[in-house]
Amino acid sequence: MESIRSVPGVGSKLAGRFEALGIRTLEDMLSFMPRSYDDRTRERMIGETTEENPTAICRIHVRKASSFYNRKGEKTLKVTVVDDDGTPLDLLCFNRGFLEGSLTPGSSWYMICQVSVRSDPTFFGRRCYRSSAAFELKRTKAEAGIGSILPIYPLTEGLTEKVMRRAAEYAIRNTEISDSLPFSIYGRHGLLHDKEAYALLHFPRTAEDAAKARRSLAFSEIFRLLFPILRGKPERKDRHVPMTEKEKALISSLPFSLTDDQLRAAEEIRCDIDSRIPMNRLLQGDVGSGKTLVAWISALHAISRGGQVAFMAPTELLAKQHADGASALLSGLGVRIAFLSGSVKGQPRRLLLRSLKDGDIDLVIGTHALFSEDVAFRSLTLAIIDEQHRFGIRQREALAGKGQNPSILYMTATPIPRSLALTMLADYDISTLRTMPSGRIPIKTHTIFQESTRKAMYETVGVEFQRGHQAYFVYPRIDDEGDGGLLDVTTMYSRLKEIYPGVPSALIHSKLPEEEKMGILSDFRDRKLMYLVATSVVEVGIDVPDATCMVIEHAERFGLAALHQLRGRVGRSTLPSYCFLVAIGSLTDDARERLRIMKETNDGFLIADKDLEIRGPGDIGEGERQSGFVSLRFSSIASDLKLVEEARAECERILAEDRGLLKAENAPLRNISLHP
C-alpha cells in the first residue's frame, strides 16, 4: 500500500499529522469519511442567507476599508463590501491586518463567509449584515469551488481542508480500486462500483451522489464483516429431539403452562445439546419472560444424557437466588445441586471440588469462581452463563475450557437490538422469548417532573402497602457527597421511615457484605420487609411477586436498559404494578426522550432498538470480536438495519448456493477483510 507521503507536498511533518487521524496510506485516505459537505453548487447572495443557512457564496466588491484599535491597543481591520445585488456587508478582520493590502477599495473577490444579521438603528431599522467569522477570498469561481460540493473532514492541528481535499483527490487518481463484492451484487442492490463510490464519497456532484456512495460502501463493509463469520458458522439441520423423563416431570409439576416461545427455545437447545456440533446459543428475553426456567429444562436434558451442568451468574447475590430456585424445582427430581462462590472456602470447598471432579454433582451454580484453576469437572456438557454481557470473552472461554467442547447457553434479560444481533452475534444461534407468561399485566409507568407531584406518588405507594404489596425506592448513589441536588439512599432511608412510619424496610447497596445483602433480600421475599431503599444493585435477578411499586429517583441519570431492568423488578405476578420515574429539574433532550420511551412502551425489544438509536453501539460487549464495531467507517449499526439485513441475506444466499465452494464470481471473498 502506497504511503500518504506520496501525495505532492506531504513530507514527514505533514505525514505525522495525517497519522494522528489514522491515515498512513492512500487506501486509508480513500476510506476517511467526510463528516459533512459544503454545498457550493450555486451562488448565494448576502441577502439570501438565513439563520439556518448563514453562508454567503458570491462575488463581492470592496467599497471602503478602515482600521480601529480596541482597549488593548490591538488593531482590527473593518472592510465594507457589497455583492452583485448591492447588499452591503461589514467584514471585521480580527488579527488579519495582512489583508489590508488586498482588500483595497475597488477590488473584487469571490467570497465564502458566514453572515450574521441584526437590526441597526443607524441604518433606519434596515437589516445590517456583519461578519466577524473566518472567511475565504478567491480570485475566480473555480478557486472558490462555486459549482461544486466540497468535502469537510475531521481535522487535527496542522491540517487544513485544502490539504485533505488534495490528498483525497490524489488518492482517487492514483490508487488501483477493484470491486470488493461479486459483480452481480452491485446490480441486485443498486450499488455503485467501488471506484465510483470512493470518488463520489469525496467529491459528489449532488447530495444524492454522496448518499448513494456512502450506502454502497456501507453495504460492502457490512457484507465483508458478516461473510467470514457466517461462512465459519457450523450448519445445523432441523430435527426433532424428544424430551427426557426429567424434563417432562418438571413441566408437568408447574402450576402454569409454558409459553410457545419457551417450548420452542427448549427444543432448539435440546437439538443443539444432542448435536455433534457444540452449541453456541444466546437465549434472550424481556424481564420476566421465563428464561431461567428454560435454562433448568435444558440442564435436565444434559444431565439425563449423563453430563454435568455449570450455571454462572455475575454476582453472588444472583447466583445464590438461582441456587435456591433450582433446589426448589429440581432436587425432587434427583438432581444433585451445589453452590460455589468465592465465599465458599476451606473444607467445604475442598469436598465440593472433589465431588464435582468425581461426577457426584450434576449441577453447580456459582459466580466467576467456577472458572478458578482448581475447579474441574468429570463431564461438563453444558455451561449456562446468565447476564452474558457482564462477562468478557476470555472469562466465558475459561469456563468452556473446563469440558471437552461443552455446549454453551448465554442468557440475557437485556434484549439485543436486531441490527446488533444480525452482526455482532452473527456466529451465535439465537432463541428469543417475546411472549410473557399468561396473566401478566403491563406495568403502568408515570413520569414525575414537578416537586408538587411527589406527594401524590408517595400516597399511591402507601395505598399499595395497605394492600399488603411491596415496593422499591432506587437512588443513583449511596450517600451525600456534598451535592445537595442529588438524593441518596442513606439520606432517603431516614426520610422514608418518617413518611411510612411502622412499615418495615431496609437499606441495600453495593458496599454491604454479600451475606448481609442476601439476608435482606431473603427477608424481602418472605415479606418481613415491605420496601427496600436501594441503589441499582437490585437491577437484575430479583423476583418478588408481591412487589408492585418501583420508584426511580433522578431517572434522567439512568440509561434506557437500566431503567427497563429496574422496572422489571415489579409486575412479576398478576397484580397491577406501577413504576414512577422521578426527574425534577432541567433535562437534556436525550433524557426527555428516554423517559418518553419508557412511559410509552413496556416492550424491551423496542426499548433496546431505541436505546441503540440514542446512544449508538458504544461498548456493546467486552472482548475481541466486538471490538470490530468501533472501526466501522461507512456504516452505522444503529441506523443501517435495512442494509444489515440485505447484506446478511446476500451472504446466506451465496453460502446456500454451494456451501464451502464459492462460484467463480465470489472468489474474491475468500480473503475478505473489513477495510479495503
Image: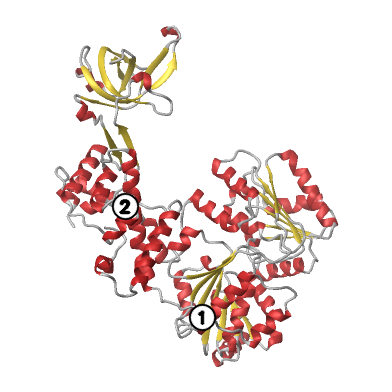
N-terminal of the pair, mark 1 or mark 2, is 2
On residue 166, which mark appears? none
- From the viewer's side, name the closer residue of 372 and 669: 669
Q: Residue 233: where, in percent of width, then height?
A: 40, 73
Question: Which numbered marker is on residue 191?
Answer: 2
Q: Does residue 375 appear in this view?
A: no
Q: Is residue 205 above or below residue 90?
A: below
Dot 1: few (<14), some (14–19), or many (≥20) neighbours within 10 Å?
Answer: few
Q: Nearer the viewer, residue 256 or 336?
A: 256
Image location (x, y in percent) of residue 468: 83, 60
Most foreground residue, 329 or 268:
268
Q: Amino acid at mark 1?
A: Arg
On-image quarter of the C terminus: bottom left
Above/below status of 464 relative to 263: above
Classify 10 Å Cα crowding around label 2: few (below 14), some (14-19), many (20 and above): some
The residue at the point 37 percent across, 66 percent down is 653
| Mark 1 → mark 2, Cα distance in angstroms | 38 Å
